[in-house]
C-alpha cells in the first residue's frame, strides 16, 4: 500500500508496526519522484542508491529494536545548499557543477545519526538568492498546485517535493524567508528556527548573519520532530547557541492556546496584500480567538525599512562569502588555456559560473562595503537591524507570539516578476524582519485563497530560543483549521499527472 | 653626487614605523584543528575549513587568544574587553576564502610600548617605541611560481599552491611612528625587533625564527628635511628576514629616499621588497591606488571578550623581561656583552642558566655549551639541547672541578653521553676514563719515559725545567691522556731532583 500521502508521523508508526519497511517506503518515494518530478523539477539530484542503502540500514535498526530516533527510516529531501559527503552539492549554481563535498554538514550528520533517509538534493534559487526558484541555473521548479506558478524561493524545491508527495520531510534554509515563503505558497509547513538554533556548519553561506537551516514538512508535528532532530549546539559553528533545544514536539502536541496573547503586526498587512490572503489570515485569527487566545495589535514601525536594510546586509555578506568561488580549489574553471593568469581565469570563471541575480547582489554588496560608502549603507543597515530587534522586543513585551500573513500574495506565475527584481524582493517583506532579529518564524497553511484557490500561509513568530511557542500556536491552529475545512490544506492539492 | 648614509641623515630626519608579524606556535591553526608543523608535504595539513570549502566555518583557537593577550601584556598594552574579527576582502589564489579573517578597528590589544636600548656616540640611550595595536589574523597559503627566471609571478609558466600555511595564527604588532631617532633609526629598528623577538621567545608563544618566516618585519620609513617638523611619504619594505636585514633595510631606504628627494623627485607610497644581496630595495605593489579591502565584522565569529580575572591570571604568569634578566645574569656571571649575545643568539641562555643553577661554574657552563657541545650539535644539525641536558653537563663540569676528569677526558664523556651510553658516570665506567692520580701507576710511567729519553732527563736534572715538557707529554701519551698532568709534573720533577 502506498504511504506517500501520509504524514511522517503516520509513516513512522507504520515502520514501527512493521506494516512497511524503510526500503519499501524509500522505494515508494523514489517511484513517485520518477513519476512526477519531470513536471515539478523539485530535485537536482536523486541519490537512489545512497537512500536505499540508508533505508536498509534503518530496517536493521528497527529490526534490532535500536531505532535511532522517532524519524528512523523516514525519507527526506535536502536543499542543495547543505553539504553531504560525496553527493553533488551545487547550490543551484553552475559554479559548483560537479562538486562533491568531502564532508557532511552538521545537519546531515544529525539526520544520518537519527536514521533519516536522504533521498536527494532539491532545487533552489542560485546560492539561495531569490523568491521563486527561477534563479536556479538548472531551470525552475513548478508549484504542484499550479504548474505555471512558482513554488516560492529560494527553497522552492524542498517545498514542492513535500506538496507533490515526493518526500514527507525536507530541509530548507532561510535567509530572508526562503523556508517560510515557499511553505506558504505550496500549502506546507516551514520553520526558520532561532538564529543559532541549528548549526550552519556545512550550509553554503549566502549571508552568514541571517542564514538559518530549518525543518519543512506537511504538518506542524512532523516539522517539530524534524526540528528536534537537527537542532542543538555545535562547537563547529561559533554562532550556534549553547542551550537546550526548545521542546517543540511537546509544544506541537499541546493543542491549547488558552490565555496566550497573540500580537498582530499592523505593518505586515494592509496595502499590497491580496484580499484572499488577508481574509484567510483573519479567519485564522478568529479560530485562535475561539481557542481562547487573546488577539492584540502591535506596531513595529521599523519594519518599513526591513527590505531596504536586508538588501544591503545580505548582499554585503554575500559579496564576501561568494568570493571563494574562484575556480582554484573546486567547482568549474573557465579560460585556463595556459596563457591567462590566475586573475583572468578567476574572472572568466565568475563571469560564466554566476547567474544574473547573484552578480547583481555581489555588485550591490561590494558597493555597499566600499570605503566611503560603508557608513551610509552597511552601517545604516546595521542600525535598522537594531531598531527592528527593538521593535520585536517591545512587541514581545505585550504578546507571547506575533503573527502575520506569511506572504503578501499567493504563488505568482513563473516569469511574472523575473525581470522586476524589486517586485520579487517584496515577496519577502513579511518574512525578512524575523531574520534581521534572529528570532524564530513558522509558516503553516491557513487555507486556500478565495480569489485564486491557491494556498495561503500564516506566519507565527516567537522570541529567540522560545521556538516552542510558535509550535504550540501552530499545532492548535492547524487542528482548528482541519476541523473547520474538513481536511488539511496539503491534502487538497490537485492530482499530478503520473508518468 | 649621490648622498651616502651619513650625508643623508645630516640633511633628513627619518621616521620609522614597524609592523611585525609573528606566527604563533600553537599546535593547531587559528580557526581549525589542522597541524601547524613546519615543513610538511604540501597540502597535507589542510581541511575544509582552512581550504575555505563552501559551508565550512571558523572556530577561534583559544590558545591563540591566550598567546595574543600575553604578548599584549608583555608590551604594556591594554587588553580590549571586547574585540572582533573582521574580513579583509581581496582576491589572491593563495588565500582560500579570498578574504583574510583579521582584526580591523577592534583589535585585542592596544596602546602599549617597548623600551629599547642602543649604543650611541654619547653612550647607551633608551628609546621608547609606542605600540599602537596587537591584533590576530590568519596566515595565507604559499604560491610557488614555476618556469619564470626569478621565481616571481611575472614570466612564470604556472603556479603551485600550498595551503599548509593557510590559517596558521598570526599576531601583528604595529608600532606608532617612531620619531626622533635621527641617524640611529636603523639601530633602533634592529634593537626593537631584537627585544621583541626575545620577549616573544620568553613568553614561549612563537618560534620567532626569522629565516623560517615565523617572525616577519615590515619596515616603514619616511624622510623629512631636518627641522621641517613634517612627515614625509613612507615606503613599506617587506622581505626583511634577519635582524641584520632590518638594520640594512632601514639604512638602505634612508639613502634611497634622500637621493630621490635631493634629485627633486617625490617618494611614492609603495611596498618595496628588500634584496638580501645588495641591501637595496626594489619596488613591489604600488599603494597609490589604495586597495579597498571592504572590511566588515566577521559574521561567522562571535566577539572575543576575555574575562578580566583571566587577564590578571595571565599577567601574573608573565616572565621577567628579557632585557632585565640579561642584565641580572650578566652581572651575576661576570660575562661580557658579546658573550651574553652569543648565548642569546644560540638560544642557550636558559640552558646555561639551568646548568649554573645545578652548581656549575658560569665560565665553564658557558664554555661547554657554546664550545664543544655546540660544535657537535652543528655537525648533526640539531640544537645543542637535543643532544644533552643541563643536568648531564653540570655533572661533567662538577667532575672536572673535583679533578676527576681532565678537559680532554670530559670531551670523551660528553661524546659518550651524546652517543647514548648513559649518564656521565656510566660513560666513565664503560670507557674507563678515570684520571690516573695513583702515585705508583704514575711512577711506573714516569720511569718508562725517563728510560726512553735519558738525554732529556739529564737536561732536566741539570736544571733545564722546560725540557720536562717532553717527558710529561710522553707520560700523558702512555696513559692515554688519563693522567693528572699536574701530578705527573710534580712527581717527575721531584724524581729528577728538581722538586
Image: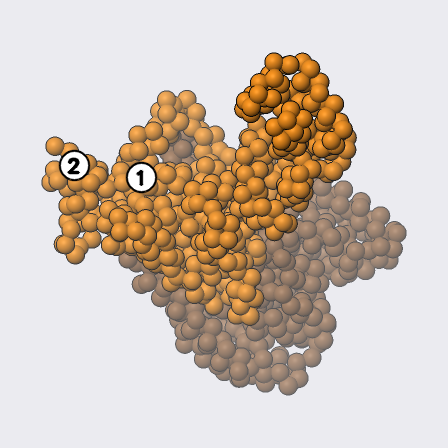
Chain colours: A brown, B orange
Q: Quadrant of the C terminus of chain A?
A: top right
Q: Position of residue A252 (x, y in %)?
A: 69, 71
Quadrant in the picture for residue B307: bottom right
Residue at the image position 56 percent from the left and 23 percent from the top: B463
Residue at the image position 42 percent from the left and 73 percent from the top: A387
B104 to the left or right of B31: left
Earlier sequence position, callout 1 versus callout 2: 2
Quadrant in the picture for residue B4: top left
User: Which residue does the numbered mark 2 point to in the structure image?
Assistant: B3
For the residue carrying disc 2, how many other residues have a C-alpha within 10 Å: few (<14), some (14-19), or many (20+)? some
Between B301 and A435, the residue placed more toward the observer is B301
Instruction: Tell me, for residue B249, which label it has, or none.
Output: 1
Secondary structure at badge 1 equals helix
Residue at the image position 54 percent from the left and 51 percent from the top: B204
Residue at mark 1: chain: B
Q: Position of residue B229 (x, y in %)?
A: 16, 56
B446 to the left or right of B37: right
Same chain letter for marks 1 and 2:
yes
Decide: is B435 above or below B294. Answer: above
Q: Is residue A254 visible?
A: yes
Q: Is residue A92 visible?
A: no
Amino acid at each position: 500500500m502506498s504511504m506517500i500521502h501520509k504524514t511522517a508521523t503516520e509513516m513512522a508508526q507504520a515502520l514501527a508496526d512493521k506494516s512497511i519497511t524503510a526500503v519499501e517506503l524509500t522505494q515508494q518515494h523514489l517511484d513517485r519522484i520518477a513519476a512526477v518530478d519531470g513536471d515539478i523539477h523539485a530535485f537536482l539530484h536523486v541519490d537512489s542508491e545512497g537512500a536505499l542503502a540508508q533505508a536498509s540500514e534503518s530496517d536493521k535498526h528497527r529490526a534490532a529494536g535500536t531505532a535511532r530516533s522517532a524519524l528512523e527510516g523516514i525519507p527526506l529531501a535536502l536543499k542543495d545548499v547543505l553539504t553531504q559527503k560525496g553527493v553533488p552539492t551545487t547550490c543551484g549554481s553552475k559554479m559548483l557543477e560537479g562538486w562533491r563535498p568531502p564532508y557532511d554538514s552538521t545537519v546531515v550528520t544529525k539526520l544520518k545519526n537519527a536514521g533519516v533517509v536522504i533521498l536527494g538534493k532539491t532545487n533552489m534559487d542560485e546560492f539561495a538568492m531569490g523568491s521563486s526558484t527561477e534563479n536556479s541555473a538548472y531551470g525552475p521548479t513548478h508549484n504542484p498546485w499550479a504548474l505555471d506558478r512558482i513554488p516560492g524561493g529560494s527553497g522552492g524545491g524542498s517545498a514542492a517535493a513535500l506538496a507533490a508527495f515526493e518526500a514527507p520531510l525536507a530541509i530548507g534554509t532561510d535567509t530572508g524567508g526562503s523556508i517560510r515563503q515557499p511553505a506558504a505558497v505550496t500549502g506546507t509547513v516551514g520553520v526558520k528556527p532561532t538564529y543559532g538554533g541549528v548549526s550552519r556548519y556545512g550550509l553554503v553561506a549566502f549571508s552568514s548573519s541571517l542564514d538559518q537551516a530549518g525543518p519543512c514538512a506537511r504538518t506542524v508535528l512532523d516539522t517539530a520532530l524534524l526540528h528536534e532532530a537537527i537542532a542543538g549546539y555545535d562547537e563547529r559553528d561559533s554562532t550556534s547557541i549553547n542551550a537546550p533545544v526548545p521542546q517543540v514536539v511537546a509544544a506541537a502536541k499541546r493543542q491549547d492556546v488558552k490565555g496566550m496573547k497573540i500580537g498582530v503586526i499592523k505593518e505586515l498587512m494592509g496595502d499590497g496584500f491580496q484580499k484572499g490572503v488577508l481574509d484567510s489570515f483573519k479567519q485564522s485569527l478568529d479560530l485562535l480567538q475561539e481557542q481562547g487566545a487573546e488577539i492584540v495589535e502591535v506596531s513595529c514601525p521599523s519594519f518599513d525599512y526591513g527590505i531596504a536594510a536586508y538588501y544591503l546586509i545580505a548582499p554585503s555578506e554575500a559579496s564576501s562569502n561568494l568570493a571563494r568561488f574562484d575556480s582554484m580549489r573546486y567547482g568549474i574553471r573557465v579560460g585556463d588555456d595556459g596563457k591567462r593568469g590566475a586573475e583572468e581565469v578567476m574572472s572568466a570563471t565568475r563571469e560564466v559560473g554566476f547567474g544574473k541575480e547573484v552578480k547583481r547582489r555581489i555588485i550591490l554588496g561590494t558597493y555597499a562595503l566600499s570605503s566611503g560608502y560603508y557608513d551610509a549603507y552597511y552601517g545604516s543597515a546595521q542600525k535598522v537591524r537594531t531598531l527592528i530587534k527593538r521593535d520585536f522586543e517591545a512587541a514581545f513585551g505585550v504578546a507571547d507570539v506575533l503573527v502575520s500573513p506569511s506572504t503578501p500574495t499567493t504563488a505568482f506565475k513563473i516569469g511574472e516578476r523575473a525581470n522586476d527584481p524589486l517586485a520579487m524582493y517584496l515577496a519577502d517583506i513579511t518574512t525578512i524582519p524575523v531574520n534581521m532579529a534572529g528570532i524564530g518564524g513558522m509558516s503553516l497553511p491557513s487555507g486556500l485563497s478565495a480569489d485564486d484557490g491557491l494556498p495561503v500561509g500564516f506566519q507565527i513568530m516567537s522570541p529567540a530560543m522560545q521556538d516552542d511557542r510558535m509550535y504550540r500556536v501552530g499545532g492548535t491552529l492547524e487542528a482548528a483549521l482541519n476541523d473547520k475545512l474538513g481536511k488539511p490544506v496539503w491534502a487538497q492539492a490537485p492530482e499530478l499527472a503520473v508518468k | 653626487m649621490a648622498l651616502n648614509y651619513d650625508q643623508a641623515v645630516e640633511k633628513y630626519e627619518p621616521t620609522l614605523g614597524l609592523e611585525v608579524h609573528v606566527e604563533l606556535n600553537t599546535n593547531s591553526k587559528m580557526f581549525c584543528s589542522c597541524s601547524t608543523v613546519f615543513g610538511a608535504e604540501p597540502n597535507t595539513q589542510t581541511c575544509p575549513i582552512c581550504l575555505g570549502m563552501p559551508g565550512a566555518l571558523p572556530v577561534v583557537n583559544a590558545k591563540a587568544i591566550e598567546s595574543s593577550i600575553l604578548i599584549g601584556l608583555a608590551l604594556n598594552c591594554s587588553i580590549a574587553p571586547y574585540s572582533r574579527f573582521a574580513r579583509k576582502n581581496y582576491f589572491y589564489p593563495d588565500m582560500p576564502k579570498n578574504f583574510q579573517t583579521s582584526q580591523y578597528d577592534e583589535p585585542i590589544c592596544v596602546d602599549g610600548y617597548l623600551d629599547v636600548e642602543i649604543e650611541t656616540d654619547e653612550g647607551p640611550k633608551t628609546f621608547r617605541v609606542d605600540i599602537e595595536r596587537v591584533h590576530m589574523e590568519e596566515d595565507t597559503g604559499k604560491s610557488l611560481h614555476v618556469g619564470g627566471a626569478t621565481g616571481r609571478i611575472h614570466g612564470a609558466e604556472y603556479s603551485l599552491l600550498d595551503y599548509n600555511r593557510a590559517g596558521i595564527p598570526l599576531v601583528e604588532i604595529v608600532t606608532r611612528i617612531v620619531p626622533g631617532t635621527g641617524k640611529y633609526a636603523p639601530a633602533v629598528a634592529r634593537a626593537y625587533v631584537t627585544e621583541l623577538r626575545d620577549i616573544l621567545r620568553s613568553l614561549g608563544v612563537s618560534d620567532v625564527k626569522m629565516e623560517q618566516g615565523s617572525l616577519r618585519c615590515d619596515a616603514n620609513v619616511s624622510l623629512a628635511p631636518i627641522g621641517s617638523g613634517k612627515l614625509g611619504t613612507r615606503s613599506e619594505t617587506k622581505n626583511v628576514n634577519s635582524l641584520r636585514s632590518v638594520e640594512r633595510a632601514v639604512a638602505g631606504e634612508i639613502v634611497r629616499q634622500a637621493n630621490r628627494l635631493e634629485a627633486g623627485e617625490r617618494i611614492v607610497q609603495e611596498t618595496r621588497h628588500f634584496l638580501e644581496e645588495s641591501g637595496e630595495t626594489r619596488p613591489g605593489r604600488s599603494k597609490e591606488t589604495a586597495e579597498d579591502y571592504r572590511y566588515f565584522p566577521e559574521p561567522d565569529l562571535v566577539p572575543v571578550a576575555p574575562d578580566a580575572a583571566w587577564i590578571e591570571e595571565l599577567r601574573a604568569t608573565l616572565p621577567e623581561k628579557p632585557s632585565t634578566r640579561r642584565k641580572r645574569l650578566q652581572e651575576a656571571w661576570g660575562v661580557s656583552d658579546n658573550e651574553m649575545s652569543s648565548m642569546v643568539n644560540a638560544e642557550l641562555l636558559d640552558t646555561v642558566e639551568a646548568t649554573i643553577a645545578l652548581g656549575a661554574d658560569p665560565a665553564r657552563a658557558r664554555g661547554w655549551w657554546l664550545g664543544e657541545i655546540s660544535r657537535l650539535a652543528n655537525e648533526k644539525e640539531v640544537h645543542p639541547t637535543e643532544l644533552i641536558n643541563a643536568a648531564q653537563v653540570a655533572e661533567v663540569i662538577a667532575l672536572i672541578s673535583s679533578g676527576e676528569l681532565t678537559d680532554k677526558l670530559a670531551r670523551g664523556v660528553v661524546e659518550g653521553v651524546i652517543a647514548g651510553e648513559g649518564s656521565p658516570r656510566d660513560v666513565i665506567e664503560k670507557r674507563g676514563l678515570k684520571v690516573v692520580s695513583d702515585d705508583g701507576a704514575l711512577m711506573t710511567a714516569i720511569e718508562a719515559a725517563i728510560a726512553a729519553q735519558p738525554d732529556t732527563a739529564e737536561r732536566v736534572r741539570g736544571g733545564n725545567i722546560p725540557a720536562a715538557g717532553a717527558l710529561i707529554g710522553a707520560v700523558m701519551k702512555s696513559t692515554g691522556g688519563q693522567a693528572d698532568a699536574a701530578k705527573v709534573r710534580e712527581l717527575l720533577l721531584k724524581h729528577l731532583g728538581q722538586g
